[in-house]
Amino acid sequence: MPRHGWTAAIAFLLAAFSVAASAQGNYEIQVYGAETVAPKSLMVEVHSNFTPTGQKYIIDGVRPTNHQEHETLELTAGINDWAEVGFYVFTSEQAGYGISWVGDHIRPRVRAPEKWHWPVGVSISTEFGYQRAVYSPDTWTWEIRPIIDKTAGRWYFAFNPALEKSFNGPSTNSGYSFAPGVKVGYDFSKKINAGLEYYADYGQLWHFDSLHDQSQQIFAVTDLNLSPEWEINFGVGVGPTAGTDHLIVKGIVGRRFNWGGKKEAK
């Protein structure tokens, strides 16, 4: 690998970590790319996340995360060549609690059209929804997520500097929190991309929590580009801070269904 390629990757990671609110609640652990689902297409994804080592006790009425299995169904429909809308159904399975519905979110998103010929991909999503209080003390929340990505040779970079706001729960009066996500991947072949994903919740914007209370997760991940119709991502993540589940295993399997629109490029 040319020296400048490694230098660019390391510089990107350091910059993102230095500027890098909740890392998607461990239900949908994903760094978004800027591309939207093509019109006349539906993306069906299943997010599976298991926590081998997490919080073992009930805290403020919230169930422990240790040995929780999360299954999330995500349906995303393309509206036109620059807009989509997604819908989530969150579920949890755990010994002693059984299988439970956790909540639902809706997520519209728009992007800069390809005809603008911007040097980087840019889109913005906004997500609003409900989650039960036994899984999240903040039951109604809103997120706005700018998305910037770039492919440079075999390298892929994405940055999601999200802002989150609670409308019901203990964080209602806390303002906006800063919840960034970062992805750096490298194409080892035409079908295999591997790299790192980083998620954080630093707390209230302009007044971050102490490092002890922050949520930070680093995942080693692999993306399999087996077909334009399929999306497969899996990884293992560690949480180095006390406010984070210490070990999580995640997987995403997605299938595109097209009924006459332009197929998405991979």
Image (cartoon, grey):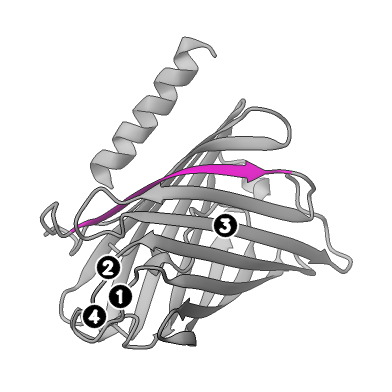
Element under disc 1: loop
Where, by quadrant of the figure, is residue 97 drawn? bottom left
Determine the CA span between mark 3 and mark 1: 21 Å
In this view of the protein, can residue 120 be seen by the observer?
A: no
Asked if residue 108 can be seen in this view, the reply is yes
The residue range painted magenta reads: 214-225
Q: Is residue 48 above or below residue 238?
A: below
For label 4, the residue is: 58
In reply to whether residue 200 is colored magenta, the answer given is no
Q: Nearer the viewer, mark 3 or mark 1?
A: 1
- Cβ–Cβ below 8 Å for labels 4 and 3? no
Amino acid tagged 2: Gln
C-beta proximity under 8 Å, tags 4 and 1: yes
- Callout 2 crowding tier (Cα within 10 Å): few <14, some 14–19, many ≥20: some
The answer to whether residue 224 is magenta is yes
SS of the residue under disc 2: loop
Measured in 3D between alpha carbons, the distance from the residue under mark 4 to the one under mark 3, in whole angstroms, is 26 Å
Label 4 crowd (10 A; few <14 / some 14-19 / many >=20):
few
Q: Amino acid at mark 3?
A: Gly
> Disc 2 designates what residue?
55
Q: Label 4 sits on what residue type?
A: Ile
Q: Earlier in the sequence, mark 3 or mark 2?
A: 2
Q: Is residue 11 rendered to the left or right of residue 47?
A: left
